[in-house]
Amino acid sequence: MTETVVLVGTDFSADAERAVSHAFEVAAALGGRVELVHVTPRLEPLFGGSKRSRAAVEQLQDEEVEESRRALDVFLADAEVPARAHVQICMGDPCQALLDHADTVDAAMIVVGRQGHGAAGRFLMGSLTDKLVRRSDRPVLVVPPGQGP
């Protein structure tokens, strides 16, 4: 029998911290573990770029990933995340990266915090949460803003 995996995405916000708490509660209830994922954007040089600009963008990408790792360490310490978590930093579109990683680990569900952008914000920017709910073939647990575990 395989272990139940609960995937939770984090952007290091207070909403994400609440989602992480909920993910651990669900994983504990199911006797599973948490897969904690942060997605950093994939940087690309404009118009293909020269060899030098591609190298500069690659260096910036490496710095972004390293900064994400440091931020994740601080987030984990502040959130008091139990040891039964696997941490993954992915690059690319947040929605697609979370969906792809959920497939990779065969997650039973995805947990995310919902940021309070309001209708106008969702219309202008789109919503990661909305995209995940529409595109996922597995359950998505959305933790509302300001809701404790």
Image (cartoon, grey):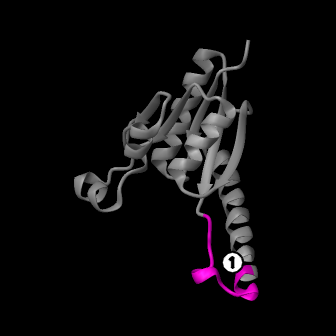
The picture places residue 33, in percent across and down from the top left corner, at 68, 26
Q: Residue at x 75, y 76 (%)?
A: 59
Res. 1 visible in picture: yes
Question: Which residue lies under the disc numbered 1?
Answer: 57
| Direction from residue 82 to residue 102 in the image, left or right | left
Relative to residue 142, is residue 62 drawn left or right?
right
User: Is 49 inside the magenta-drawn segment?
Assistant: yes
Determine the residue located farthest toward the top in the rendered image. 1
Q: Residue at x 62, y 79 (%)?
A: 45
Quadrant position of residue 120: bottom left
x, y percent for residue 12: 55, 53
Front-most of residues 99 and 4: 99
What amino acid does circle 1 point to?
Answer: Val
Q: Residues within 10 Å of mark 1 (few under 14, many from 20)?
A: some
Secondary structure at numbered mark 1:
helix
Q: What residue range appears in magenta?
A: 42-54
Q: Is residue 34 above or below residue 76?
A: above
* Residue sitting at x 71%, y 19%: 3
Q: Residue at x 57, y 44 (%)?
A: 98
Q: Is residue 149 visible?
A: no
- Please, is residue 81 above or below residue 48 in the view? above
